[in-house]
Image: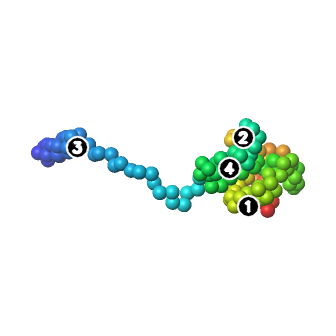
Amino acid sequence: MGLAVVILGLFAVNSFLIAESPEKPVEQGPLPKGNRILAIKVNTGKDGDFDKTFNESLRAGNETQVLPLDWNELETTPGTFKPTTNFLAIANVYYPALTIPIHLTLRPVHTSQKVVPTDLMDKPFDDPHTIQRFKNLLD
């Protein structure tokens, strides 16, 4: 019983000390940038002038262009890669001239929608045929 009273007494004193001496928050400035990259997804502005909008993003600190492309936009029919608008070809000319790297994302899912070629819509993502087709897309 004596040991329990001592333990409870120590607990009460410890709780009192914690309640009476709150730690002061440590004031902290901004963290150094390190190797992080600021990426802004730039679209054509309201006036339709992409160059103007992109240059505004660069002035805001943008260091790369995010280029997300849906799988079904690139592979229009099985094994055929002829997008209506060839954003990859455009990007290959536009961004190197500005020495801007591209953050390329090839999406089989866009938000919550499956965006694969129509002949693969009923196949699961782990189906060997789907996997091989995605590898072909990457090639």
Q: CA distance from mark 1 to mark 4?
A: 15 Å
Which residue position is annotated with label 2? 45
Query: Comparing marks 1 and 4, which lies closer to the viewer?
Result: 4
The image quarter in which residue 64 lies? bottom right
The circle on residue 96 is: 1
Residue furthest to the left: 2
Instruction: Indicate the amino acid at tag 2.
Output: Gly
Q: Is residue 114 visible?
A: no
Q: CA distance from mark 2 to mark 3?
A: 54 Å
Q: Are marks 4 and 2 in contact (CB under 8 Å)?
A: no
- The N terminus - image quarter: top left
Q: CA distance from mark 4 to mark 2?
A: 11 Å
Residue at 14% from the left image edge and 46% from the top image edge: 6
Sequence order check, earlier mark of 3 and 1: 3
Please provide percent x and percent y for residue 84.
86, 47
Which residue position is annotated with label 4? 55
Q: Circle 3 — which element?
A: loop
Which residue position is annotated with label 3? 21
Query: Comparing marks 2 and 3, which lies closer to the viewer?
Result: 2
Residue 27 or residue 48, whichever sits in front: 48
